[in-house]
Amino acid sequence: MNYSADIKKMSRHFLPEEFAITTWESLEPFLKNLVDRGINNLQELEQWLHDASELEAVISEEASWRQIRVTCDTENKSLEESFVFFMMEIQPQIQTYSDKLNKKLIENPFAGELDSKKYFTYLRNVKKNIDLFRKENIPLQAELNVESQHYAMIAGKMTVQVKGQEYTLQQATKFLENPDRKLREEVYRKINERRLQDKKDLDELFTRLVNKRQQMALNSGFENYRDFRFVELGRFDYTKNDCFQFHDAVHEYVMPLVNEIYENKKKRLRLSTLRPWDIDAEPQGTEPLHPFKNGDELVEKTISCFQELDPFFGDCLSKMKAMGHLDLESRKGKAPGGYNMPLMESGAPFIFMNAAGQLDDVTTIVHEGGHAVHSFLTHNLELNGFKEYPTEIAEVASMSMELFSMDHWNVFFDNKNELVRAKEQQLERVITIFPWIATIDKFQHWVYEHPGHSLEERADNWMRILEEFSSPVIDFSGLNEYRRYYWQRQLHLFEVPFYYIEYGIAQLGAIGLWKQFKQNKKQTLSNYINALSLGGTKTLPELFKTAGLSFDFSSGPVSELMKFVKKEMDSLVYE
């Protein structure tokens, strides 16, 4: 089947083409129309669903653009005010109408005539939203939407001086690859000292977020926010116990490989002790990898890489470049991290990241590029709700792209040994990311199981969990003050709680797809595209099955996939 990246903005039938959301007063009549409209047969119900979907897409895109703009420039007060206005004045009003529309759909006598296969996951989500809705949570959710963005504003201001020049923390990390060990330690300490300057503000911000989240859970009849959030995220197909099982599997089957990687690193660097500032370093005489010089070159090389893998993938990025939907380079005042923001009406998403000239940036753009391809593939699905796919399959889309694309990383590295180094580092990262995923996820479970905890209890339990997934090969002596606040680096804790185990589940899925890819590239890419094209119209296990995967992250599959990655790492040969 041929796919096209020549994406078109959805045509409007319910809203005027020129309509833009500026005030609540201008938006409310369309919501009121949907609430008050009579529905006398199945055809009218389906037209009502299409009109509601059109409105949802317009609202979603407006919210997305306001968030994109504020993360691209956290110091612009007018952009901040625009975002806050939408989240505090418009979004809360929408929520009340959304609940009315959900109930109107479920209670409609013709809802039972809707195609059960086509609408199963959609209606399941609608019923879940009805069950969770509480009026008293509307102001809390509005406050959380705004307050969680304060993390980006605090982190976006963090810079350090290295060799007399100012760098964002993302830019400064490139010095951790430098062969000069003294410089690496200096930069490592500067980055962590800078983070400590805001530890109090971030601790207080997190406490406020935890308290408000816990109150939302109590309002909705849940004992804690974790249980509430699992329902809110639509985790119909796994439980907290599956997460605990994943933590155990990482400890048993991944940590030995992690320790082996760090032992090899210590030998290559000829060090008697491996310190945290040595992890990304190269031996003396070996230059760090320089896959690109600037953001423009990163885009061009990534498009070439994607074109070689599959022309459709390259066309997706080319379309986004032409539309100005890429903001890639790190700069002061820009929020940290990276994301692909779907734009539900116009279709072509927006990629945001903080490139600083490192291999990690290549990984990030192909990762976000995988998300972008997913957005393109689902744009023409009939309803906006069909495009709301589970985050676990979304991360399979992105993490698989990291592994698929390695076959074409020669566009970044024309030297064969550098290409081998890049692949080796990527596969090491595939393995070493698992302990961090388990750490962050296990920490979140503890935080929300103990919502009234003190700051000291939080730090102590963070350290307990961190130690469980830290390699004994790395010497952390004298660095405990930094390590007690390592969790503050993870924006997901502040902005998207409990969104992290998905990376672990998806990494296993991505490794499974890559294993297929090594045997039959054409069939695997077909499985990948077919699964992503379904959006959220199937259950998570069904989406995995379409991709040729089993939805299982217990000890057995984890052990087998780790053996496969280890075998692939061992097969890399330098000239």
Image: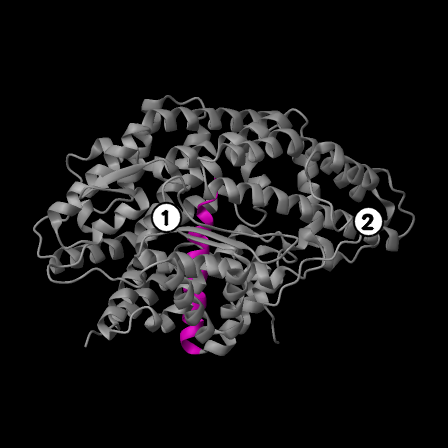
Horizontal side, residue 199 vs residue 502: left or right: left
Q: x, y percentage for residue 82?
A: 58, 34
Q: Which mark is residue 330?
A: 1
Q: Amino acid at mark 1?
A: Ser
Residue situated in front as seen by the camera: 447 or 140: 140
Q: Which mark is residue 209?
A: none
Residue situated in front as seen by the camera: 139 or 240: 139
Q: Residue at (21%, 59%) from the top-left corner?
A: 288
Tell me which secondary structure the magenta stretch mostly adopts: helix
| Residue that label 2 marks | 48
Q: Tell me the quarter of the picture where residue 569 sits.
A: bottom left
Q: Is residue 178 above or below residue 567?
A: above
Image quadrant holding the N terminus, namely bottom right
Q: Can residue 518 be found in the magenta stretch?
A: yes
Residue situated in front as seen by the camera: 429 or 323: 323
Image quadrant holding the C terminus, namely bottom left
Q: Which residues are magenta?
A: 498-519
